């Protein structure tokens, strides 16, 4: 599950859906996790929920139009079904019953032997759930039906769907279609031939979160979209390949950005990877673009890498639902994600079958 940040004194997870903009004395003194240009449309994403309707009015009225030089129409919200129940015997993450907004917790997730085994178990289940969800992707299915299947498989395995109730998120999985960068809410919209859809699964099993996502083709997808998805997956794999104890985290961003540049794709900067384990989002913050951030990987640490690439604009616009984030120009976006464990020999991918 992707996290993201606004320019403000404290880093918070974008998955809260409530990013507030605060004026500071010096932007350079803060992590540039939410870059912006004064006066540009995407600054509206930094405003609170109070102004999200204005964002929708000013910048999303174009959703009724077809995109230039494309038969594809802009993504529009569908009907969201009621929240699905979770059996009482399944343990909940602390944030589910808390009124305190969750965020990015201080301190890395570094595990002992037992913790590593728990992370392997949660990662494997997340991978299996994602794999099953991917088999459902076809023209005519709704993203709500995918959510139903994901929800059922997670609870059948005695786990909790981590997104459900996180900062008020209403569903058990994120489904981000076409120009949706991240945090798409499953709804009644039918997947259409030629779409691409990212499915982002996180499970909470035995007190540990496993987090993964992949982008899938819906029917007959054109070459432009296929190449974007292919390169995004390559970016993730290349980034994982350089991970090991002592490696600087900023090498991840350089590796991804270098690969994206070769294909003239944009790298979304506002949403980041993160530590994951006993908490959903923790240090370190993983930037997917070139940066001068400090910090090095340590043995037995777990975190996600989840690059988001676009064909066009990298500027995000948030819908009035306070969750769905789309590209400013309606261009396609793709994402892949794994949870990894830093080992003596490099990195172990925890979220694969």
Image (tube, rainbow, N blue to C red):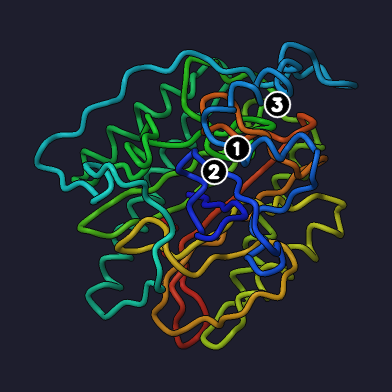
Task: Specify the farthest residue to the left.
Answer: 89
Of residues 211 and 234, which is closer to you in this image?
A: 211
Residue 111, position as x, y percentages in the image: 31, 77
168, above or below 271, in the image: above
Q: Nearer the viewer, residue 145 or 2?
A: 2
- Mark closer to the observer (3, 2): 2
Residue where numbered disc 1 is placed:
47
Does the CB distance between marks 2 and 1 fall below 8 Å? yes
Query: Which badge, 2 or 1, is on the more N-terminal residue?
Result: 2
Q: Nearer the viewer, residue 97 or 70?
A: 97
Would you place residue 309 above or below residue 331 in this image? below
The image position of residue 32, as x and y in percent, is 67, 61
Q: Secondary structure at mark 2?
A: loop
Seen at 59% across and 41% down, the residue is 215
Q: Dot 2, how many residues are within 10 Å of its Cα: few (below 14), some (14-19), or many (20+)?
A: many
Q: Residues within 10 Å of mark 1 (few under 14, many from 20)?
A: some
Q: Report the residue at 81% width, 36% height from top.
A: 223
For disc 3, the marked residue is 220
Task: Measuring from the top left, give residue 56's x and y in whole percent.
Answer: 65, 22
Nearer to us: label 3 or label 1: 1
Which image quadrant for residue 154? top left
First in sequence: mark 3 or mark 1?
Answer: 1
What's the residue at 73%, 11% (across, down)?
Answer: 64
Check disc 2 and report the residue beneath it: 19
Q: Quadrant of residue 280?
A: bottom left
């Amino acid at each position: 599950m992707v996290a993201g940040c606004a320019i403000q004194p404290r880093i918070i997870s974008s998955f809260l859906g409530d990013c507030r903009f605060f004026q500071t004395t010096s932007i350079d003194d803060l992590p540039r996790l939410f870059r912006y240009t004064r006066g540009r449309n995407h600054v509206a994403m930094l405003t609170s929920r109070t102004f999200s309707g204005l964002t929708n009015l000013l910048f999303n009225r174009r959703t009724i139009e077809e995109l230039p030089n494309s038969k594809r129409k802009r993504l529009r919200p569908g009907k969201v079904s009621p929240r699905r129940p979770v059996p009482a015997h399944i343990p909940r993450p602390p944030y589910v019953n808390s009124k305190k907004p969750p965020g990015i917790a201080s301190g890395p997730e570094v595990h002992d032997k037992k913790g590593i085994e728990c992370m392997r178990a949660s990662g494997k289940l997340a991978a299996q759930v994602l794999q099953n969800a991917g088999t459902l992707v076809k023209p005519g299915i709704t993203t709500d039906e995918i959510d139903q299947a994901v929800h059922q498989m997670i609870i059948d395995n005695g786990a909790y769907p981590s997104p459900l109730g996180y900062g008020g998120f209403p569903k058990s999985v994120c489904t981000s279609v076409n120009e949706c960068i991240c945090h798409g809410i499953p709804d009644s919209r039918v997947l259409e031939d030629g779409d691409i859809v990212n499915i982002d699964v996180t499970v909470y099993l035995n007190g540990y979160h496993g987090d993964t996502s992949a982008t899938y083709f819906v029917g007959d997808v054109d070459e432009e979209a296929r190449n974007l998805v292919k390169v995004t997956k390559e970016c993730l794999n290349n980034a994982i390949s350089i991970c090991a104890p002592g490696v600087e985290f900023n090498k991840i961003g350089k590796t991804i950005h270098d690969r994206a540049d070769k294909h003239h794709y944009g790298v979304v900067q506002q949403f980041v990877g993160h530590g994951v384990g006993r908490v959903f989002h923790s240090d370190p913050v993983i930037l997917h673009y070139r940066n001068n951030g400090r910090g090095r990987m340590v043995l037995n640490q777990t975190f996600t890498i989840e690059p988001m690439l676009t064909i066009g604009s990298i500027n995000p616009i948030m819908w009035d639902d306070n969750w769905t984030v789309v590209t400013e120009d309606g261009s396609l976006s793709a994402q892949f994600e794994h949870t990894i464990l830093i080992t003596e020999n490099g990195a172990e991918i925890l979220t694969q079958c």
